[in-house]
């Protein structure tokens, strides 16, 4: 427009040049007007032409992008030997559908067991609760992987609920060998109980059937009308669209009479999501009897008052002698605060897509059966009903660093004033971790280009065998932070070298009622393994009364969000150049020294010293800021010239102190929370630090890692196991409504080679870039860039695998 204005001004001025020529003025005016018109039209035409050219260029670029070939989805072919794969299948692969069916038929053929199908099982029947592969002994597996020969026999290990026996028990059985089964016998080991009191059993479908068949009808008959009057809602299943939902708080056996099984039932509105709609109604049930028809409701808590029975509660309510609650069932608008429906206005205002990662040359990892290979990493995996995801035989540059890496337990310890919250301590493995791993959503739970595997297992909670779709995902992650880099500028000899941090991530997400735990195992180019937990999901809450305030912030209307602690137990079977290892610390200390170069003056200086731990009791570690340490697995053979042995360091900053007194109540069931790290000598029978019975068995734990420690074996030059505990204390805040996010709720530990390699193993990575001046004396006059793919432009189009169209037709994989 500025150019057009100047042209118009010129025309006006040009017309003024001829203002004195009266005879030719008319002619000249016409010529001048035509000239101005032609100039203006010409300029506008040029402008329009340039705009059209720009549009065409942009359009062509868009079309070019749209026409780009899709990014490859096939993995790069690698040389993975079929013999190697077959051996790993022989020893690590979970039970196949055929093997599971063989075990079921064999057990059903044994009349004395009286096994019924789980779909017909009740608490007073005998049925198979869970089944999985029983791993062979470690030395036998390693020998077979290295030398071949006859593979170890495949066996199944099972927990049988024998509620029909007298006395009723839960028993651990081993069945095998597969495929030609000849025996089924109760396991008999010294490290843990294999005949478990029946009142220690975890929840099962059979128990929940009994709740709906026998317990709720009794409550509905006695006080159902009171619940309707108080909450405008009914107990399921006959409740229409105004339903109450219930949850349970088991009481640790150490807090109740020996041989009994009790739980508090507490109630919420059944809306999205229920834990943000707690109610002030609870009752205590004695569930000791195997016949659910004989369960007894003992105490009732209502409107912050306690009653000795349902009858007592009903009588006092009818007499008008107690406080009464009056609440309306939440309307759609009232319940919106707790839902994950979108909030307005949407951000960003325009529909702009979030950044995505993609693999321009296809995935750089392979998954064949249960074998994973990624760059210089190799490993195996399996998913079991009781343990969930486990990684085995983790190798870097063909040398095993870790034999097993797995999560063992999640313990959540709440505090509160109401009866249920005061004893609300959960050990989530009771819900069978493997069955909680499923339904990962591409594009959200894992990147669009991730690879997914389904699992297959047998549990009574799923009424037998079933496929768990999208249970684990695998993807390479670009963290967009340098793994290493340095820029040296001209005056110090210019160069630049850098490598972005990428890792193979193996992820599963465990959903347990209101919490979701994102479990990541991450493998980096420099030989480091990171194990990370990210927490999300909904808060555990209670109905707000002022008495709750010391334990639970009042975050919304009638909601008190319960303060709680999270503890995660992990197992790391680390092997440094073989299984003969030792555990030592590099202790960082401070002392006053005489400076030999400073005229005899004294000053403080840090130094380190090596401290070898010779027994299991010496090796337990409780974090202390006053005594910083490097915690090291090492071997004492082939020590490098620098005098420090090849080692692997365990490092974390995410440790929390367990505050419950040792041995009191539920704490006795989770002794691993006493330590940030405990070291024990490998024993085949000491394969777990927790069990599916932990929620109930505090009086006499089925698996007790403290006993592993107390036998105080020597641990110098032995095969060692690290039991690692991550933890956090959580006081909820309003920002946790409706759904707590993972940012700021992440914990991790690292397994780090220390003096293990002669130099940084990532130095041979093609992903790195090195830049040096063409002329060292003139570093600003251009540079030589060395890169082997890091800066190559991607010309393919990423594929978005968010399964919207599939979900609109069939949502089985996500919700089943």
Image (cartoon, helix red, strand yellow):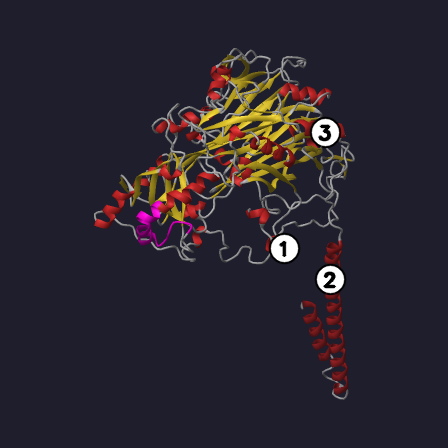
Residue 24 at x, y = what percent? 77, 86
Say which mark, if any, is on residue 779: none
Tell me the element at label 2.
helix
Residue 783 at x, y = what percent? 76, 38
Is residue 537 one of those drawn in magenta?
A: no
Residue 270 at x, y = what percent? 42, 50
Mark 2 crowd level (few <14, some 14–19, many ≥20, 10 Å Cα): few
Q: Which residue is mark 3?
A: 86
Mark 3 crowd level (few <14, some 14–19, many ≥20, 10 Å Cα): some
Q: Main secondary structure of the magenta part?
A: helix
Residues in magenta, as a range: 218-237
Q: Residue at x 57, y 47 (%)?
A: 814
Which residue appears farthest toward the front when viewing the image? 111
Q: Quadrant of the N terminus?
A: bottom right
Per the model, the C-alpha gap separating discs 3 and 1 is 38 Å
Is residue 222 one of those drawn in magenta?
A: yes
Q: Nearer the viewer, residue 299 or 789?
A: 299
Q: Residue at x 72, y 59 (%)?
A: 58
Mark nearer the N terminus (3 vs 1):
3
Residue 730 at x, y = what percent? 43, 37
Closer to the camera: disc 2 or disc 3? 3
Q: Which residue is mark 1?
A: 805
Q: Residue at x 50, y 58 (%)?
A: 345
Tell me the element at label 1.
helix
Mark nearer the N terminus (2 vs 3):
2
Mark nearer the N terminus (1 vs 2):
2
For residue 550, say whether it is visible.
no
């Amino acid at each position: 427009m500025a150019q057009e204005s100047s042209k118009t001004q010129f025309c006006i001025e040009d017309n003024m040049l001829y203002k004195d020529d009266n005879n030719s003025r008319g002619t000249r005016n016409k010529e001048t007007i035509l000239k101005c018109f032609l100039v203006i039209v010409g300029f506008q035409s040029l402008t329009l032409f340039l705009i059209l050219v720009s549009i065409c260029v942009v359009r062509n670029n868009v079309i070019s992008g749209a026409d780009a070939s899709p990014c490859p989805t096939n993995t790069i072919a690698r040389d993975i030997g079929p013999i190697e794969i077959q051996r790993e299948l022989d020893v690590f692969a979970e039970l196949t559908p055929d093997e599971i069916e063989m075990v079921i038929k064999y057990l059903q053929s044994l009349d004395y067991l009286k096994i019924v199908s789980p779909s017909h099982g009740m608490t007073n029947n005998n049925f198979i609760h869970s089944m999985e592969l029983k791993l062979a002994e470690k030395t036998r597996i390693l020998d077979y992987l290295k030398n071949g020969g006859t593979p170890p026999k495949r066996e199944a290990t099972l927990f049988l609920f024998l509620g029909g026996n007298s006395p009723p028990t839960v028993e651990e059985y081993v069945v095998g060998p597969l495929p030609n089964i000849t025996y089924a016998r109760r396991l008999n080991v010294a490290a843990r109980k294999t005949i478990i009191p029946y009142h220690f059993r975890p929840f099962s479908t059979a128990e929940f059937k009994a709740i709906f068949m026998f317990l709720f009808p009794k409550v509905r008959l006695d006080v159902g009308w009171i619940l309707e009057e108080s909450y405008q809602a009914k107990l399921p299943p006959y409740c229409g669209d105004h339903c109450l939902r219930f949850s349970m708080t088991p009481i640790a056996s150490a807090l109740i009479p020996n041989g009994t099984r009790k739980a508090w039932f507490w109630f919420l509105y059944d809306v999205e999501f229920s834990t943000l709609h707690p109610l002030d109604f609870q009752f205590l049930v004695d569930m000791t009897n195997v016949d659910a028809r004989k369960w007894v409701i003992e105490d009732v808590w209502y409107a912050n008052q306690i009653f000795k029975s349902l009858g007592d509660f009903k009588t006092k309510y009818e007499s008008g002698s107690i406080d009464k609650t009056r609440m309306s069932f939440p309307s759609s608008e009232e319940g919106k605060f707790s839902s994950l429906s979108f909030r307005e206005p949407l951000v960003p205002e325009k529909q702009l897509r979030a950044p995505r990662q993609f693999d321009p040359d296809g995935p750089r990892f392979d998954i064949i059966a249960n074998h994973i290979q990624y760059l210089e990493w190799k490993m195996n995996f399996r998913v079991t009903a009781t343990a969930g995801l486990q990684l085995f035989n983790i190798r870097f540059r063909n040398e095993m660093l870790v034999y097993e890496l797995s999560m063992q337990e999640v313990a959540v310890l709440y505090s509160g004033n109401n009866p249920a919250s005061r004893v609300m301590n959960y050990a989530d493995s009771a819900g069978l971790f493997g069955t909680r791993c499923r339904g990962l959503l591409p594009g959200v739970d894992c990147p669009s280009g991730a690879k997914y595997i389904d699992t297959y297992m047998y549990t009574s909670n799923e009424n037998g065998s079933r496929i768990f779709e999208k249970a684990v995902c695998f993807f390479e992650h670009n963290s967009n932070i340098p793994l290493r880099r340095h820029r040296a500028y001209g005056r110090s000899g210019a160069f630049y070298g850098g490598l972005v941090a990428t890792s193979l991530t193996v992820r599963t997400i465990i959903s347990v009622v209101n919490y979701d735990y994102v479990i990541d195992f991450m493998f980096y180019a420099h030989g480091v393994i990171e194990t990370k937990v990210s927490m999300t999901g909904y808060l555990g809450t209670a109905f707000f009364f002022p008495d709750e305030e010391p334990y639970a912030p009042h975050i919304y209307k009638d909601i008190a969000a319960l303060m709680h602690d999270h503890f995660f137990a992990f197992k790391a079977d680390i092997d440094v150049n073989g299984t003969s290892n030792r555990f030592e610390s590099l202790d960082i200390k401070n002392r006053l020294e005489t400076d030999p170069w400073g005229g005899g003056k004294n000053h403080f200086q840090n130094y380190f010293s090596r401290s070898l731990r010779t027994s299991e009791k010496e090796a337990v570690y409780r974090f202390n800021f006053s005594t910083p340490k490097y915690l090291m697995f090492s071997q004492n053979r082939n020590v490098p010239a620098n005098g420090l042995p090849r080692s692997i360091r365990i490092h974390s900053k995410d440790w929390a102190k367990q505050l419950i007194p040792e041995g009191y109540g539920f704490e006795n069931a989770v002794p691993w929370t006493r330590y940030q790290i405990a070291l024990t000598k490998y024993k085949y029978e000491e394969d777990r630090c927790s069990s599916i019975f932990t929620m109930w068995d505090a009086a006499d734990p089925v698996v007790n890692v403290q006993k592993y420690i107390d036998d105080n074996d020597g641990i110098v030059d032995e095969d060692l196991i690290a039991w690692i505990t991550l933890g956090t204390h959580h006081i909820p805040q309003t920002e946790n409504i409706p759904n707590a996010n993972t940012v700021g709720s992440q914990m991790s530990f690292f397994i780090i080679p220390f003096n293990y390699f002669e130099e940084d193993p990532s130095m041979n990575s093609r992903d790195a870039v090195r830049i040096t001046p063409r002329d060292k004396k003139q570093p600003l006059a251009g540079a030589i860039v060395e890169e082997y793919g890091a800066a190559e432009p991607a010309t393919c189009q990423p594929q978005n695998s968010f399964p919207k169209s599939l979900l609109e037709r069939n949502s089985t994989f996500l919700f089943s």
